[in-house]
Amino acid sequence: MHSVPEPDAVLSIDCDDCVQQHTEVCADCVVTFLCGEVADSPVVVDLAEARALRTLGDAGLAPPLRHVRSTG
């Protein structure tokens, strides 16, 4: 299940917080796909952009968001 931000909210994706960073899963993440490599700073998307990214991923046109925030 995908996490969807509240209206007018933003989704901040920080690769440094992701447990998948520098793995094969990271290489198949939409953030890596869009940025060309692991992002140097957090990627911020709004609700409409998050929906568009999910739609592209669901259609197989872009990789899905694979970010998994570390808990420690």
Image (cartoon, grey):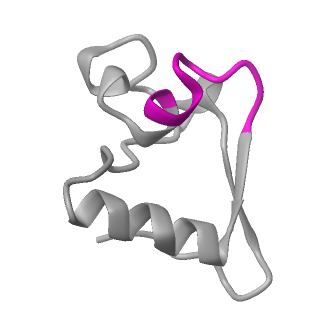
In the picture as drawn, the residue positioned furthest to the top comes out as 22
Image point 34% across, 21% down: which residue? 27
Image point 52% across, 20% down: which residue? 36
Magenta span main SS: loop
| Residue range of the region highlighted in magenta in the rendering | 32-42
From the image, which quarter does the N terminus lie in? Answer: bottom left
Q: Quadrant of residue 49?
A: bottom right
In the picture as drawn, the residue positioned furthest to the front comes out as 61
Query: Which is more toward the observer, 18 or 56?
Result: 56
The stretch drawn in magenta includes residue 57: no
Residue 3 spot, x, y in % from top left = 46, 70
Q: In this view, does 8 lie above or below 59?
A: below
Q: In this view, does 70 lie to the left or right of 29?
A: right
Q: Is residue 55 left or right of residue 34?
A: left
Q: In which quarter of the image is residue 16?
A: top right
From the image, which quarter does the C terminus lie in? Answer: top right
Residue 57 spot, x, y in % from top left = 30, 57
